[in-house]
């Protein structure tokens, strides 16, 4: 018989020897191995400590070792092996058709820091209209619907495959009556629609970085990562189109990775706000409708 602790230690040692890369829900070998060990044993992902001394059967140990082996052999992020990703207490189905959810925008939604300004249309009803642009798995659309219980949310993505994954997650959360899925290349299929809040975590990896990404990141859809030579192709297009799709008092919230300096150089007159996240300031920007550039 062996214990969960021993399986975990063996997994950490193997992951470190293999030089795996992290960043898809975990930041190190210990957390990644713990996630996979607990998943293989059918245990909740946040309940490691109470089970460390638990003895496992030979069959359970084989199942754990097989999953740890797949992580090393395939270099797929754990989320693709378990088909689940977590943002706080919220679970989402994922597979290789979408990037693994990891947006800082989740923290701002969770903290209640995001919301549109005063609007004659809304009055006191609180019936916000929200757009999640580049929705991927649909995680931000779902979290926005949970944060704004009377809101109607459009979840848009260029990828039909991604929308299939989002559809599954929307159904899991029973939000089909409040979240509408739209296949759209940014704003192209949203003509005439205005929103009180636009959330977007678009592609923002520059071409040179794409070529040097660890293998785990190259398992994700390139369409959801690459954004031109400087990583700002999507950001420019969103800034150019957002004003037409924001209601008076509306707010744009966009994640841009490590591109703050490049964006501020490209738009020196735009008064970007940079709310604090666990990564620091500079990863997510906010702009009110009247602060957006007229041309980008």
Image (cartoon, rainbow, N blue to C red):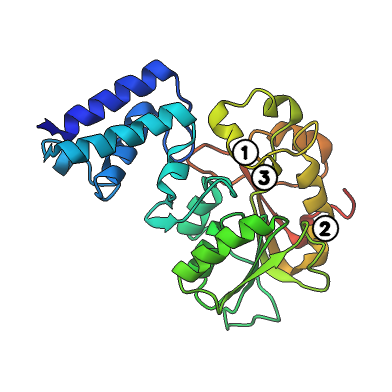
**Is residue 195 at all visible to an observer of this figure?**
yes
Q: Earlier in the sequence, mark 1 or mark 2?
A: 2
The residue under label 2 is: 241
Q: Nearer the viewer, mark 1 or mark 2?
A: 2
Q: Dot 1: what SS?
A: loop
Dividing the image into 4 quarters, which one contains the N terminus? top left
Q: Nearer the viewer, residue 70 or 246?
A: 70
The residue under label 3 is: 224
Location of residue 80 with respect to 136 vertically, above or below = above
Using a 10 Å C-alpha cutoff, classify the residue at mark 1 as few (fewer than 14 neighbours), some (14 to 19) or many (20 or more).
some
Q: Residue at x 82, y 58 (%)?
A: 241
Q: Residue furthest top?
A: 17
**Is residue 111 at all visible to an observer of this figure?**
no
> What is the spatial separation of the Cα atoms under label 1 and label 2, in whole angstroms?
22 Å
Using a 10 Å C-alpha cutoff, classify the residue at mark 3 as few (fewer than 14 neighbours), some (14 to 19) or many (20 or more).
many
Is residue 272 found left or right of 96 in the rendered image? Answer: right
Residue 12 position within the rendered picture, expressed as x and y whole percent measured from the top left: 31, 25
Q: Earlier in the sequence, mark 3 or mark 2?
A: 3
Q: Nearer the viewer, residue 124 or 60?
A: 60
> What is the spatial separation of the Cα atoms under label 1 and label 3, in whole angstroms?
20 Å
Contact between marks 1 and 3 (CB within 8 A): the answer is no
Is residue 42 found left or right of 110 in the rendered image? Answer: left
Contact between marks 1 and 2 (CB within 8 A): the answer is no
The residue under label 1 is: 282
């Amino acid at each position: 018989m062996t214990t969960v602790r021993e399986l975990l230690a063996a997994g950490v040692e193997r992951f470190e020897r293999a030089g795996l890369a992290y960043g898809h829900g975990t930041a190190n070998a210990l957390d990644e191995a713990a996630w996979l060990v607990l998943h293989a044993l059918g245990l909740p992902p946040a309940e490691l400590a109470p089970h460390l001394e638990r003895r496992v059967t030979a069959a359970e140990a084989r199942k754990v070792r097989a999953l740890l082996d797949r992580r090393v052999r395939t270099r797929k992020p754990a989320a693709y092996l378990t088909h689940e990703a977590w943002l706080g207490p919220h679970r989402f189905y994922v597979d290789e058709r979408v990037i693994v959810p990891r947006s800082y925008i989740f923290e701002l939604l969770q903290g209640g820091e995001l919301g549109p300004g005063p609007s004659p249309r809304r009055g006191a009803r609180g019936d916000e209209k929200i757009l999640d642009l580049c929705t991927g798995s649909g995680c931000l659309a779902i979290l926005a619907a949970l944060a704004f219980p009377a809101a109607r949310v459009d979840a848009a993505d260029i990828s039909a495959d991604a929308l299939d994954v989002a559809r599954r997650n929307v159904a899991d959360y029973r939000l089909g009556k409040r979240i509408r899925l739209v296949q759209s290349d940014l704003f192209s299929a949203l003509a005439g629609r205005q929103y009180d809040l636009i959330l977007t975590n678009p592609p923002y990896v520059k071409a040179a970085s794409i070529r040097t990404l660890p293998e785990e990141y190259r398992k994700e859809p390139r369409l959801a990562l690459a954004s031109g030579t400087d990583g700002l192709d999507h950001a420019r297009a969103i800034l150019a189109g957002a004003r037409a799709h924001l209601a008076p008092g509306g707010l744009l919230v966009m994640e841009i990775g490590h591109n703050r300096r490049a964006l501020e150089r490209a738009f020196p007159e735009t008064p970007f706000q940079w709310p604090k996240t666990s990564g620091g300031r500079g990863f997510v920007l906010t702009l009110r409708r009247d602060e957006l550039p007229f041309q980008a």
